[in-house]
Image (cartoon, rainbow, N blue to C red):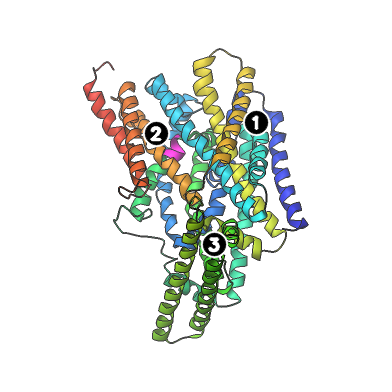
């Protein structure tokens, strides 16, 4: 990065913070702070909902996910449009009718106080963890690539977002997210077209797609019924449906976005905007990752994208082994490039097919060498994470994009981190203020006191998120990690709400204990999978938690006296 990049980066982030802080003059009540005086239009709601979900993890980790495994991750979102239709038809009218600040207020009116507290508590736990990851994700990667101190990068992101979230509330979050999404998409389109420009300097785009197809990178849909696979059309439509239904229908970070709408119609249109554009957006980001893979067919990629780990190996006794692997890798990459150019010049169908097979074989050998380097990292430092897919896209950005645009892309990543984190802090504060402080501590305070407490709680959760970010350990591809955390809790929370909406004879005690049992089952399943006892795609956690909550709540209700 040069001075131009830092000017673009600094100006973008300062502008976003100033826009958020400017909203403070509009905050005069708790409704203003938490619901923006219910004045948001559908376009702002739609972009805010999308930006809340599209964290920095989306723009850092998703291209890397596609670099490794192609477009299959898009199946994770196949259930989302159906979930948004259900939320619009069922959830939104109920929330508006009851005039709630949080989704969990409804649980008390339907069940009892302990069920409300359980739902709110489950949200606070999982969203508090997620908020830390959304700060940590860009910080750990940016600090590595730019040479910035990790904790300083965490605080740069965290403190900036806390400032405008504490001062401006929901209005600041929603308004700034609208501009952040604009910046994000400009940056992503720029990276997309620059990748195409570099590729087409070597071969036509049609030939590039043939190369990607031969490697399985374009396989977006998998009909395999193997439940061990993380991403199939069945896990996407079933597990993805439950995940999205719980996220958009019961997660306060999303509910608060559309509860700020002018009316039911504005909230519904905001969600329908996401139903139409969310899957295409994820497909576009994944496809950008595929293009980056094809780009590196013609431009030498590092054998391992995490430079910190590479530097550690260079300073270790394994240096000579690393040099041997790097030499082998360079040879394979050069051979892969030669085959790709030869394929582009060949028109004979049989000869082309044979060359594509050779290309695939050489590519597989290059992956084997990358895996050997990862094993070498583990030998030298057993506690070091070897997955480097989260570093792929930023390496491309830093090495091949023009100055100025690099600054914009870094601003995109930090903006996305700020965007999602601001929504999460705002939602954590509203749940803490309404569901706990107002309900359990002080029910008769005036509006100014509640507004002050909401700001203090936003500051508190900002500190918690920063603490989680500093203590975080990168054990998964980040886009997967954030979904795993959600999947552990979302099925149970969704089960509670579906019983509340549709199974009227089940009462509070039954659903409370049924949900506790279901959540325990999901925890056990997850830890058994982590321990290696069996394998199951994590999207199925949502189905297990949901089904177990429904089943055990009904069973317990049948065993209780009818009055309970």
The boundaries of the magenta stretch are 246-250
Q: CA distance from mark 1 to mark 2?
A: 27 Å
* Helix, strand or loop under label 3: helix
Q: Is residue 201 left or right of residue 344?
A: right
Q: Residues within 10 Å of mark 1 (few under 14, many from 20)?
A: many
Dominant SS of magenta comes to: helix
Residue indicated by mark 3: 288
Q: Is residue 378 left or right of residue 24?
A: left
* Res. 85 in view: no
In percent of the image, x 33 and y 38: which residue is there?
A: 524
Displayed quadrant of residue 493:
top left
Q: Is residue 249 magenta?
A: yes
* Helix, strand or loop under label 1: helix
Going from N to C along the chain, the mark reached first, 1 or 2, is 1
Q: Residue furthest top?
A: 444
Please, is residue 500 above or below residue 354 in the view? above
Q: Quadrant of the N terminus?
A: bottom right
Q: Residue furthest front?
A: 317
Residue indicated by mark 1: 166
x and y, in percent, of residue 318 in the image: 53, 63
Going from N to C along the chain, the mark reached first, 3 or 2, is 3
Q: Quadrant of the C terminus?
A: top left
Q: Is residue 110 left or right of residue 132?
A: left
x and y, in percent, of residue 532 in the image: 33, 48
Going from N to C along the chain, the mark reached first, 1 or 3, is 1
Residue indicated by mark 2: 493
x and y, in percent, of residue 388 in the image: 52, 57
């Amino acid at each position: 990065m040069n001075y131009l990049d830092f000017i673009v980066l600094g100006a973008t982030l300062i502008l976003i913070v100033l826009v958020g802080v400017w909203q403070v003059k509009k905050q005069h009540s708790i409704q203003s702070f938490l619901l923006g005086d219910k004045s948001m239009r559908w376009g702002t709601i739609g972009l805010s909902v999308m930006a809340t979900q599209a964290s920095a993890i989306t723009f850092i980790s998703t291209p890397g996910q596609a670099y490794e495994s192609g477009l299959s991750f898009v199946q994770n979102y196949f259930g989302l449009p159906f979930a948004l239709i259900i939320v619009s038809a069922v959830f939104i009218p109920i929330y508006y009718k009851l005039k709630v600040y949080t989704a969990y207020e409804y649980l008390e009116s339907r069940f009892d106080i302990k069920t409300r507290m359980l739902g709110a508590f489950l949200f606070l736990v999982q969203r508090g963890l997620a908020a830390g990851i959304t700060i940590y994700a860009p910080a750990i990667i940016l600090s590595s690539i730019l040479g910035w101190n990790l904790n300083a990068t965490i605080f740069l992101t965290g403190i900036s977002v806390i400032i405008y979230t504490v001062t401006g509330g929901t209005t600041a979050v929603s308004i700034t997210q609208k501009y952040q999404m604009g910046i994000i998409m400009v940056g992503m389109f720029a990276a997309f077209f620059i990748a195409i420009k570099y590729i087409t300097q070597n071969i036509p785009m049609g030939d590039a797609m043939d190369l990607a197809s031969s490697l399985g990178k374009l396989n977006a849909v998998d009909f395999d019924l193997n439940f061990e696979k993380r991403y199939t059309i069945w896990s996407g439509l079933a597990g993805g449906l439950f995940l999205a239904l719980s996220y958009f229908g019961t997660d306060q970070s999303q509910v608060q976005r559309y509860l700020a709408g002018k009316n039911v119609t504005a909230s519904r249109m905001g969600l329908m905007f996401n139903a139409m554009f969310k899957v295409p957006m994820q497909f576009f980001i994944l496809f950008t990752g595929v293009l980056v893979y094809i780009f590196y067919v013609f431009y030498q990629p590092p054998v391992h994208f995490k430079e910190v780990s590479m530097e550690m190996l260079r300073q270790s006794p394994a240096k000579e082994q690393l040099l041997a692997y790097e030499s082998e890798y360079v040879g394979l990459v050069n051979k892969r490039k030669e085959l790709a150019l030869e394929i582009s010049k060949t028109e004979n169908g049989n000869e082309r097919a044979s060359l594509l097979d050779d290309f695939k074989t050489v590519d597989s050998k290059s992956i084997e060498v990358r895996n050997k380097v990862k094993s070498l990292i583990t030998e030298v430092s057993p506690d070091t994470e070897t997955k480097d897919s989260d570093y792929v896209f930023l390496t491309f950005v830093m090495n091949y994009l023009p100055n100025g645009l690099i600054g914009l892309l870094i601003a995109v990543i930090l903006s996305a981190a700020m965007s999602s984190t601001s929504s999460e802090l705002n939602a954590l504060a509203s749940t803490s203020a309404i569901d706990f402080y107002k309900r359990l501590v002080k029910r008769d305070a005036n509006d100014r006191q509640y507004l002050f407490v909401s700001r203090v709680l936003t500051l508190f959760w900002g500190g918690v998120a920063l603490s989680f970010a500093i203590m975080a350990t990168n054990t998964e591809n980040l886009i997967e990690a954030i979904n795993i955390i959600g999947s552990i809790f979302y099925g149970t929370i969704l089960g509670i709400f579906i019983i509340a909406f549709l199974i009227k004879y089940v009462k509070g005690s039954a659903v409370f204990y049924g949900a506790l049992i279901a959540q325990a089952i999901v925890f056990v399943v997850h830890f058994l999978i982590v321990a290696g006892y069996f394998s199951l795609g994590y999207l199925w956690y949502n189905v297990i938690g949901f089904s177990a909550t429904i089943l055990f709540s009904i069973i317990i209700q049948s065993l209780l006296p009818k009055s309970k």
